[in-house]
Image (cartoon, rainbow, N blue to C red):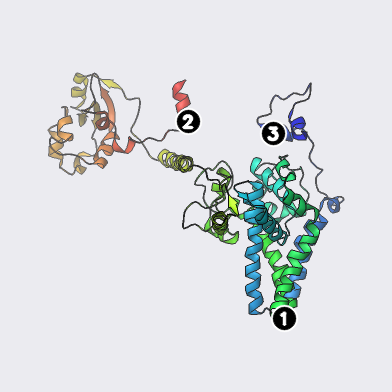
């Protein structure tokens, strides 16, 4: 209700000039004051920012310097890294943030525990920010706004208080989830157990490396996971291509997918957020997708959501046409708005310039006579005459390039002249598929 109340204009408010919903919301409240030397200390997140993202990593690096890394511990750190990452990608992200599949209670508890080992906040906090990111992408209401540079979405938003609070979203579904609320109530203890105690216990009891288990499988794993997860907010909005839509910054790239356990196909994800897949092609790296799929096969997950392939293909085609339109704009096409000329005028002008009539159009061959592959003599006998039949197979069945080149030499339209045989003969092959922008269509309709 709070969001609804804020979105309804108050009596007497002048909403004129508000161009969209985000602008309207931003106009409802004042931003935080600028950061200065006198107030900077109060604009910093000292807990989640300075302590967790700066001091803890520095202490971890110092501890790692004085702690030998054993092979068993290195393997355990990698294994536990992927387990914790899956708690975030399959749990926080695809299950709770986007509801892209249903999970049994047992799977929910496992994912909630593994995600706690990543130390990225409770489910409710994480999901609230992520849903705001999707709803208000690339705006001041987006907590990880990529338009603010690379550092802000990667780590800045965790250290410095934003000038505006992120946009409101609905998380009532999470408040009704018993597993989510259980994790929220016990989150500090779950972090202590899953992020520190458990990996230390495995390494200590397993091969006697208590200190290495704590430093590497515990703290160093957390540091690495913080930054690889942050790459979804930063790198995934800077590196790669936009095969589905380029209105916003999300991009697809294999490198980002490798860093983020499959979350690197971000352009697809922002277009089809409720799809349980992040990568739709079999060769694209997305282990989270395969984990969810395997869970569905053993009865731990169900109702895996996928957008219709037809709609996905529409998105890809739209971008392909947009790229073609841009490429097309850089190509010179036949002249339009040509003068209409009578037959007698055409013959008279042909005495002065080498004019040739083909399929309703008059062409000026000045400068081309010597370059004609069939020789100048062949062209000369048709100057001032109708060469349509000869051009369309009577003398030679010309290639697509010949048709395109001929169209560039149009200088007039013969009065009463008709296209030869079919409309396809009338249109140069290079112009048969013409990508038209919606703005061009609207201009033609008015």
**Tags 2 and 3 touching, CB below 8 Å:** no
In the picture of the structure, the residue carrying the numbered disc 3 is 23
Q: Can residue 387 be seen?
A: no
Q: Earlier in the sequence, mark 2 or mark 3?
A: 3
Q: Nearer the viewer, mark 3 or mark 1?
A: 1
Q: Is residue 365 left or right of 58 when viewed as pictured?
A: left
Q: What element carries label 1?
A: loop
Q: Residue 438 carries which label?
A: 2
Q: How far apart are marks 2 and 3 (CA)?
A: 25 Å
Q: Can residue 163 be seen in this view?
A: yes
Spatial distance from mark 3 to mark 1, Cα to Cα? Answer: 59 Å
Viewer-proximal residue, 299 or 370? 299
Instruction: From the top left corner, tell me how far across and down residue 129 is, in percent.
Output: 71, 47
Query: Residue drawn 60% across and 59% down?
Result: 260
Residue at point 26%, 30% (across, down)? 426
Tell me the mark number nearer the camera, choosing from 1 and 2: 1
Give the class, few, some or many, for how many residues have Cα within 10 Å of label 3's Cα (few <14, many ≥20): some
Find disc 1 in the rendering and name its residue: 208
Marks 1 and 2, the one that precedes in the sequence: 1
Residue 150 at x, y = what percent?
Answer: 65, 53
Where is residue 2 drawn, in percent x and y?
78, 34
């Amino acid at each position: 209700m709070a969001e609804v109340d804020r979105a309804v204009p108050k009596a007497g408010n002048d909403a004129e000039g508000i161009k969209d919903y985000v602008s309207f919301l931003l106009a409802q409240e004042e931003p935080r004051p600028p950061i200065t030397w006198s107030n900077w200390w109060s604009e910093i997140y000292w807990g989640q920012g300075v302590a967790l993202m700066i001091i803890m990593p520095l202490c971890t690096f110092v501890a790692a310097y004085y702690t030998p890394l054993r092979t068993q511990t290195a393997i355990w750190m990698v294994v536990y890294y992927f387990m914790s990452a899956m708690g975030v990608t399959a749990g926080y992200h695809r299950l709770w943030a986007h509801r892209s599949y249903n999970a049994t209670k047992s799977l929910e508890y496992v994912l909630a525990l593994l995600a706690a080992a990543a130390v990225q906040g409770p489910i409710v906090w994480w999901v609230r920010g992520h849903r705001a990111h999707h709803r208000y992408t690339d705006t001041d209401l987006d907590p990880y706004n990529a338009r603010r540079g690379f550092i802000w979405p990667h780590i800045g938003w965790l250290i410095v208080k934003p000038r505006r609070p992120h946009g409101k979203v609905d998380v009532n579904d999470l408040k009704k989830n018993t597993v989510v609320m259980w994790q929220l109530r016990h989150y500090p203890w779950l972090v202590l157990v899953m992020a520190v105690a458990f990996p230390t216990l495995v390494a200590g009891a397993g091969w006697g490396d208590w200190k290495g288990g704590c430093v590497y499988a515990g703290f160093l794993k957390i540091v690495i996971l913080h930054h690889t997860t942050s790459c979804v907010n930063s790198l995934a909005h800077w590196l790669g291509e936009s095969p589905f839509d380029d209105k916003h910054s999300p991009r697809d790239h294999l490198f980002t997918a490798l860093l983020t356990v499959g979350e690197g196909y971000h352009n697809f994800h922002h277009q089809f957020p409720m799809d349980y897949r992040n990568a739709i092609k079999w060769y694209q790296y997305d282990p989270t997708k395969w984990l969810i799929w395997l869970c569905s096969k053993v009865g731990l997950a169900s109702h895996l959501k996928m957008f219709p392939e037809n709609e996905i293909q529409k998105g890809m085609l739209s971008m392909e046409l947009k790229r073609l339109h841009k490429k097309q704009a850089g190509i010179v096409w036949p002249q339009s708005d040509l003068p209409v000329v009578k037959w007698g005028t055409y013959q008279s002008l042909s005495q002065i310039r080498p004019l040739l009539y083909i399929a309703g159009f008059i062409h000026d061959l000045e400068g081309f006579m010597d370059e004609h592959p069939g020789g100048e003599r062949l062209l000369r006998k048709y100057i001032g005459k109708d060469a349509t039949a000869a051009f369309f197979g009577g003398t030679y069945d010309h290639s697509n390039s010949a048709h395109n080149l001929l169209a560039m030499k149009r200088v007039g339209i013969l009065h009463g002249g008709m296209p030869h045989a079919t409309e396809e003969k009338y249109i140069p092959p290079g112009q048969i598929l013409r990508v038209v922008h919606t703005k061009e269509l609207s201009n033609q309709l008015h």
